[in-house]
Image (spheres, grey):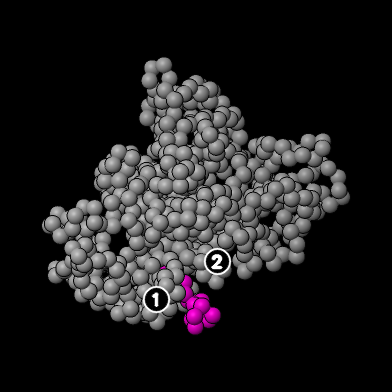
Amino acid sequence: MFQGFVDRMPPILTSAARRCGELLGTFVPEFRLRRTLVSVGRNRAVEWQNASGQNDGVVGGWQTVGPADHKWHASAALGYAAGDDGDFQRPFPLGSILIAISTDMPSLRSTCLAATLITLMICVPARGHDYFAIQVVDDVSGRGVPMVELKTVNDVRYYTDSAGIVAFDEPGLMDQTVFFHVSSHGYEFPKNGFGYRGTRLKVQPGGTVTLKIKRLNIAERLYRITGAGIYRDSILAGRPVPIAQPVLNAQVLGSDSVVNAVYNGKLFWFWGDTNRPSYPLGNFDVPGAVSRLPSDGGLDPEVGVDLQYFADQDGFAKPMAKLPGDGPTWINGLITLRDDGNKGRERMFAAYVKIKPPLTVYQRGLAEFDDASNRFEKRMSFAIDAPLFPFGHPFVHEDDGVDYVYFADPFPIVRVPATADALMDLSQYQAYTCLTQGSRVDAFEVERSAGEPVFGWKPDTIPFTPQLQNRLVKAGHLDSDQGLFRLVDEQNRPVTMHRGSVAWNVSRDRWVMIGVQHAGTSMLGEVWYAESEHLTGPWINARKVVSHRQYSFYNPKQHPVFAKDDGRVIFFEGTYTATFSGNDDPTPRYDYNQIMYKLDLSDPRLGLADGKH
């Protein structure tokens, strides 16, 4: 019976199972599932017990329940002590190893299952108990802080995972007093008497300690969404984790910026160029995933996002937009629309570009998601010099009885009627501008009435961007107070936005923007909040909510679908990367990945208490 079970296991596990079976020789009596201890996503800690019901012979484990169409379900054997009252106790070092359980076996209570679990526990020693668990928490919220650097005196660096955990096990330093310098972007650890921001810890195997760190950022860092090792140290330390794939999901090591949209009741996510473990070149044609909405059983956005990637046969996130033409495919302008005046079938569209070296756009067009193939198909291409086209992070808003798609990145300066036909017809696109209709980059004129610039929605005209506004002001075509984009900080210093997104906020009764600054205290790492009564502006006052020391956090994306308390609490993410920063020391595991933040708009540091900003 054991031989049959081994034959059904994935090859990587068979040798270990065979060896353990030889050591055991004979099997223990049949076991049955005794109870579920705790469920976390698709993971559950369970007990198997001797079928006779006796308390001896209880076996513990982590069971991962996969999709129904998967042949193999993963389960991790984990020994633990059970007290007299049956309560779950701290794991002890019997062992921890992934095994495979065939779903077409008669039942999970088979003798093979129990015997294999016990065998693996005996034969494979665990190390989870050896780690010294350091958790760094926000001194106000008490939440674990991701991406905090702990550095020893000899410059060995560790970074907290998304739960704020470092699992420390350094040969030669265990059972020693070790000093750790503690630092993180937008956070600050107290200085000691000699001015060092750090602390001495007595490092002991199996020990734990909690460190408190002060948040300087107004926004609170929550967790990493993409990449490997999101909860690596939590797993090593034997801590529970909230997501189904805590260490590696679809072989994704890192991904460029995100676009997402609700489609057919699920949240669809798509990213830019994506790295994999097996080779430096990964997916350059848009990986994708879905997650359940919080209102439909998905995780609370304060906890995490359970991504289910579209994967190839090799397990790597597959290309979702491999469109004709050489070079990578990038998408943005992701939007869902319905046919027949919002009564027909739902359709999802995205603007795409094709890229050639060095980073030149040589083709631009529109693609539509095909449900049958689970990929984007090309619908049309646009003239490369077209003045208006879809882009950025769009949303639908009604104006004068007509629903429009507004394209923002970060300012919503282009729109088109919210129909599929209009989306594919560039003649129906409009730009909000003070230029005369038909203006181009190299031939434009400011439209005036009684000497004042006339702003309005105009077709076949280049959009009015911050760069164009600066150009017009410098050339004397506009006064500085006549522009739409006049963002300043508390000291009235100008803030130039690079990229971002806009959404209506019920709590504020205003349009709110999350955008990254161009050439601030870091090149692309300073994230700002701004708001306006009108989506066309003017946008005037801004407050910095996230800061980075010589590191980028570009293309921030607000997630209105996650907003809480009518928008009093909003969520956004961005691409954390050393690219464009001048920093040649990327943060391990975190670099080139997406990190989620939470912003409480009632925070007095935003200066919004009086209802004005």
Judging by the rendered image, the residue that carries numbered circle 2 is: 266
* Cα distance in 3D space between marks 1 and 2: 24 Å
Q: Specify the amino acid type for callout 1.
A: Pro
Say left or right for 208 vs 483: right
* Secondary structure beneath label 2: strand
**Magenta stretch, residue numbers:** 334-349
The disc placed on residue 417 is 1
What residue occupies the far top of the structure in this picture?
193
What residue occupies the far left of the structure in this picture?
475
Residue at image coords 44%, 49%: 595
Inspect this view and state whether residue 171 appears.
Answer: yes
Say left or right for 576 vs 505: left
Look at the image and say whether residue 346 sits in the magenta stretch.
yes
Q: Is residue 40 above or below residue 460?
A: above
Look at the image and say whether residue 531 sits in the magenta stretch.
no
Label 2 Cα crowd, 10 Å radius (few <14 / some 14-19 / many 20+)? some
- Picture quadrant where residue 79 is located: top right
> In front here: 60 or 150?
150
Quadrant location of the N terminus? Answer: bottom right
Label 1 Cα crowd, 10 Å radius (few <14 / some 14-19 / many 20+)? many
Residue 515 in picture, x, y percent from top left: 36, 52
Residue 581 in picture, x, y percent from top left: 28, 45
Say left or right for 296 vs 390: right
